[in-house]
Amino acid sequence: MFRIIPKLDIKGSNLVKGINLEGLRVLGDPNYFISQYYDDGADEIFIQDVVASLYDNYSLLSIIKSISKKCFIPITVGGGIKSLDEITSLLTNGADRISINSHAFSNINFISNVAKKFGSSTLSINIQVMKIDDKYITFYNNGRTPSGIEILEWIKSIQNEGVGEIVLTSISKEGLMGGFDLELIEKIRQFVNVPLLMNGGASSLDDIASLKLDYDLSGVVLSSIIHYNFFHNETSDKTKLNFKIKDNLPKLKTYKINEIKKYLIDRNIEVRS
């Protein structure tokens, strides 16, 4: 079953959005967006603290406690997670899956420790990648720091450690709504033996459908194409928002999750109704 997963980047108490993981701008209250996406049929929610690794700080617990009381779909949490105790606290307070990136580069065995204690299905790795000199290099610290490790080498390492799922983020495509990095997908998909989800670049319903029809991915992780829907919907509660779209952002169509699912169903792609 193909999954539709909104990704909410959190800085402090705000939902933020950038381009190429940079230039973060405030959209509004994450609780408001999560409520909308839950009502609209999201399969899961992915919440990422985008500054936790940079500032060596972890701050999502209060948000998870709040939304888990009214959002009855799986919640994935990432950003600055470095210990089994933090994971225990998150899972106890409403999270269903943990996403790790930065700490895995400093301690690769952390992946196997998490998998052994909580199960592989509880662990997702968010691979942030950019093409440099014809090589796809992995990054951490929310796309700020290159690891020097090529993507296929990193995929092999994390799968050997027991990761349960991979979210693949194309830094160069992220936030631009200009299409997915299909070359990247082609390069890695035959080497991935766990569920693979794509993040970064969705520009149309055809883009999203292609991930399943042409590449047999397990799902898509969406931000701009659904976040900015509120600006195109004249009935939206604009008092909840204080973000203005950057002038040079392409004026592309945005969608509600139920519109995306209807389109997929019409193309015989199985989704949760």
Image (tube, rainbow, N blue to C red):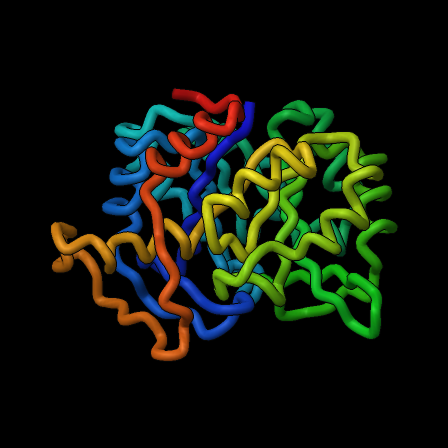
Look at the picture and state if 220 lies above or below 176.
above
**Could you tell me residue 226's position as x and y percent?**
37, 49
Q: Quadrant of the C terminus?
A: top left
In which quarter of the view is residue 123 placed?
Answer: top right
Q: Residue at x 55, y 22 (%)?
A: 1
Look at the picture and state if 179 lies above or below 162.
below
Between residue 44 and residue 258, name the one nearer to us: 258
**Could you tell me residue 79's position as x and y percent?**
53, 52
**Could you tell me residue 232's position as x and y percent?**
24, 57
In which quarter of the view is residue 86 placed?
Answer: top right
141 sits left or right of 247 in the view: right
Between residue 84 and residue 63, name the one nearer to us: 63
Q: Residue at x 67, y 40 (%)?
A: 166
In which quarter of the view is residue 71 placed?
Answer: top left
Between residue 155 and residue 51, name the one nearer to us: 155
Between residue 92 and residue 254, name the one nearer to us: 254
Number of numbered discs overlaid on the protein picture: 0
Q: Residue at x 52, y 23 (%)?
A: 268
Q: Outermost residue toward the front? A: 266
Q: Residue at x 58, y 63 (%)?
A: 173
Q: Outermost residue toward the bottom? A: 247
| Residue 246 seen in this snapshot | yes
128 sits left or right of 34 in the view: right
